[in-house]
């Protein structure tokens, strides 16, 4: 079986991560979005039937956007300045609607692609500009390129073949949802319990420009 035909356990420790350590990052979150909740429910029977997958509850549904840094390496004063710079820049943008789905399987997850990616990329660019305004352009974490907009429905908890999951998805049929993005959240993210859990640090609205 080739690497392309296999899934990996998602919960290996990435560089820098360890038990008790958390990470500041910008995410779009969907806990209060009824369309996202319905989409999770559409796929829930499939995910529940596959023990090699850990489902993502609606509470923790997210679209990873732009990292800032481990919480023990980011000064709170810097973080506050990044949030204010992000508010200023995101106020110039407008809320928008994207489509999530249909789901597909990759090496470690079942994912919902998000389209169109362009407005999401614009928000990410504004967040990167906000970080650069505080730390300088050469200190902005992560690459400006390669952003792949998606929401994860479930994570693989063991190694094994992809084919049974791909077949189950094909048999289940395609499902999508239109969700409206009106804010982006700065979160304090933890993964100690084989799940991505967080506390929100700040929410930054789109299109909240008092000058407009």
Image (tube, rainbow, N blue to C red):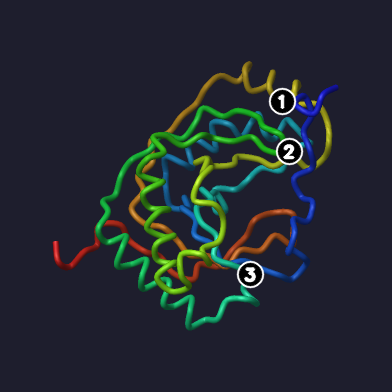
Few, some or many residues within 10 Å of mark 2 (<14, 14–19, 20+)? many
Alpha carbons under labels 3 and 2: distance apart: 27 Å
List the residue tagged with mark 1.
Answer: 165
Query: Do the residues under discs 3 and 2 have CB atoms within 8 angstroms?
Result: no
List the residue tagged with mark 2.
Answer: 53
Q: Secondary structure at mark 2?
A: strand
Q: Nearer the viewer, residue 102 or 66?
A: 66
Frontmost of labels 1 and 3 is: 3
Q: Position of residue 33 (x, y in %)?
A: 42, 47
Alpha carbons under labels 1 and 3: distance apart: 34 Å
Position of the C terminus by quadrant = bottom left
Alpha carbons under labels 1 and 2: distance apart: 9 Å
**Among the two numbered marks 3 and 2 on one chain, the one whose residue lies closer to the N terminus:** 2
**Among the two numbered marks 1 and 2 on one chain, the one whose residue lies closer to the N terminus:** 2
Indicate the quadrant where residue 128 lies: bottom left
Few, some or many residues within 10 Å of mark 1 (<14, 14–19, 20+)? many
Position of the N terminus by quadrant = top right
Query: Do the residues under discs 1 and 2 have CB atoms within 8 angstroms?
Result: yes
Q: Secondary structure at mark 1?
A: helix
**Among the two numbered marks 1 and 3 on one chain, the one whose residue lies closer to the N terminus:** 3
Q: Secondary structure at mark 3?
A: strand
Residue positioned 69% across, 54% down in the render: 195
List the residue tagged with mark 3.
Answer: 70
């Amino acid at each position: 079986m080739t690497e392309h035909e296999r899934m990996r356990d998602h919960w290996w420790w990435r560089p820098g991560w360890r038990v008790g350590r958390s990470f500041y990052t910008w995410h779009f979150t969907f806990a209060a979005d009824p369309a996202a909740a319905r989409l999770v429910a559409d796929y829930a029977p499939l995910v529940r039937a596959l023990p090699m997958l850990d489902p993502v509850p609606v509470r923790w549904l997210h679209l990873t956007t732009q990292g800032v840094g481990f919480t023990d390496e980011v000064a709170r004063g810097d973080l506050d300045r990044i949030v204010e710079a992000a508010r200023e820049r995101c106020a110039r943008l407008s809320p928008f609607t994207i489509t999530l789905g249909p789901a597909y399987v990759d090496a470690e997850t079942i994912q919902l692609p998000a389209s169109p990616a362009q407005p999401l990329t614009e928000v990410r660019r504004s967040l990167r500009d906000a970080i650069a305004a505080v730390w300088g352009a050469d200190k902005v974490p992560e690459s400006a390129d390669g952003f792949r907009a998606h929401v994860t429905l479930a994570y693989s908890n063991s190694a094994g073949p992809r084919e049974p999951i791909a077949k189950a998805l094909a048999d289940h049929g395609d499902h999508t949802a239109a969700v409206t993005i009106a804010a982006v959240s700065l979160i304090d993210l933890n993964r100690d319990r084989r799940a991505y859990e967080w506390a929100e640090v700040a929410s930054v609205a789109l299109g909240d420009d008092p000058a407009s």
